[in-house]
Image: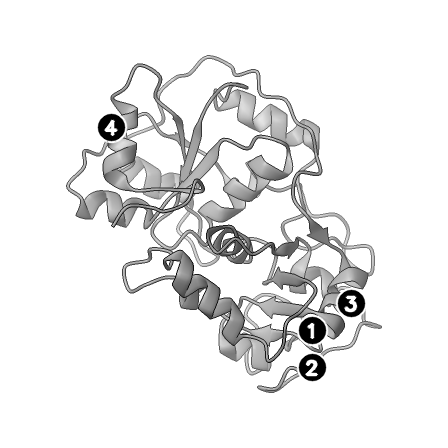
């Protein structure tokens, strides 16, 4: 089934575009909290002409100091840092950009979101990621990325809405704040990365896995709208999303774009929230 929005592209359409006179720039943004490093996966197989985009260094700034001033484990890159990374990867102002991950867009969406935040609107996500590409029988390449000439992409920050701790708490109270992490982390039963377990009081849990089908493809727009509607018991003035460090929650922003439903990203997410011990923490299955 073809992608139905201008934020997604299906493998056959991408393959046709790559064979055209003006092919899109393709970025592989595979990454996993548990590893292995994405570059190793890239060298094993990737879409022809793709460049490897490192989440930790290209789509995030170095984490600042710990404590109440922390901005989380994957802070938003500076405009200069993002431009430098994308120019190194050969991205130009006029380029159409396609980003992909392994399957479910939970990492690729961070790349999509960063491009849009910094003012580059012509960016799409490969729906279903590399798994969909392989299922469609498309060609792959191995080894290191091909050499590219330096790009000329510029940045105009502010193209996407963001939340900070104060506005995230306000959305949790008056709107709908979605926690995209696994249920056990939301409930506070386990926390493999951050020093405190639980969730932001008032947030509801909707893991990234619930916004895709069993093949990792984002739900169709009508289904996505019903998914968002089912998360609240009333119309809400605003919707926000967070996760552990602001990576996977970008998938919910992408899902919102599919459903024509604006969603703001709390970039600092849980890792920033718990850096200040004065911020409240809720445990258990209820939002609180």
Mark 2, other Cα within 10 Å: few <14 / some 14–19 / many ≥20: some
Q: Residue 16 carries which label?
A: 4
Looking at the rendering, in which quadrant would you find the C terminus? Answer: bottom right
Which disc number belongs to residue 282?
Answer: 2
Eye-nearest disc, 2 or 4? 4
- For discs 1 and 4, the disc positioned in front in the rendered view: 4
Give residue 145's position: percent from left, percent from top.
36, 26
Q: Where is residue 184 in the image (x, y as percent from the top left)?
A: 51, 79
**Can residue 142 be spotted in the picture?**
no
Where residue 111 appears, as percent x and y from the top left, is 51, 41
Closer to viewer: mark 2 or mark 3: 3
Q: What element carries label 4?
A: helix
Which of the two labelled residues, at mark 3 and mark 4, occupies the earlier sequence position? 4
Please indicate, yes or no, whether residue 164 appears anywhere in the rendered image.
yes
Q: How far apart in space, not on screen, are marks 1 and 3 (Cα)?
A: 11 Å
Could you tell me which secondary element the residue under label 3 belongs to? helix
CB under 8 Å between callouts 1 and 3? no
Q: Distance between the residues labelled 3 and 4?
A: 45 Å
Is disc 2 placed on a helix, strand or loop? loop
Q: Which of marks 2 and 3 is nearer the N terminus?
A: 3
Is 17 rendered above or below residue 276?
above
Q: Residue furthest left?
A: 137
Where is mark 1, residue-wise? 200
N-terminal-most mark, 1 or 3: 3
Q: Do the residues labelled 3 and 4 touch (CB within 8 Å)?
A: no
Q: Is residue 216 left or right of residue 106?
A: left
Going from the N terminus, do you reach mark 2 or mark 4 first? 4
Whether 111 is drawn above or below 32: the answer is above
């Amino acid at each position: 089934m073809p992608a139905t929005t201008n934020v997604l592209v299906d493998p056959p359409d991408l393959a046709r575009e790559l064979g055209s006179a003006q092919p899109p720039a393709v970025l592989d943004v595979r990454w996993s909290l548990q590893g292995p490093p994405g570059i190793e996966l890239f060298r094993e197989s990737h879409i022809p002409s793709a460049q490897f985009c490192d989440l930790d260094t290209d789509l995030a700034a170095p984490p600042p100091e710990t404590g109440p001033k922390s901005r989380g484990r994957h802070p938003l890159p500076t405009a200069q840092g993002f431009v430098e990374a994308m120019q190194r990867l050969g991205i130009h102002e006029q380029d159409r950009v396609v980003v992909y991950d392994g399957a479910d867009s939970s990492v690729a969406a961070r790349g999509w979101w960063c491009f849009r935040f910094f003012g580059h609107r012509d960016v799409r996500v490969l729906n279903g990621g590399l798994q969909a590409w392989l299922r469609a029988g498309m060609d792959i390449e191995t080894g290191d990325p091909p050499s590219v000439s330096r790009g000329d992409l510029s940045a105009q920050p502010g193209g996407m809405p963001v939340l900070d701790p104060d506005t995230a708490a306000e959305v949790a109270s008056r709107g709908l704040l979605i926690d995209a992490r696994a249920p056990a982390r939301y409930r506070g039963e386990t926390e493999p990365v951050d020093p405190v377990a639980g969730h932001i009081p008032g947030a509801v849990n909707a893991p990234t896995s619930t916004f895709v089908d069993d093949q990792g493809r984002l739900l169709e727009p009508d289904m996505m709208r019903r998914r968002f509607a089912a998360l609240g018991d009333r119309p809400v003035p605003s919707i926000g999303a967070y996760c552990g460090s602001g990576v996977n929650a970008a998938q919910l922003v992408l899902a919102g774009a599919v459903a024509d439903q604006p969603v703001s990203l709390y970039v600092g997410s849980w890792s920033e929230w718990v850096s200040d011990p004065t911020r409240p923490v809720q445990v258990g299955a209820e939002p609180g």
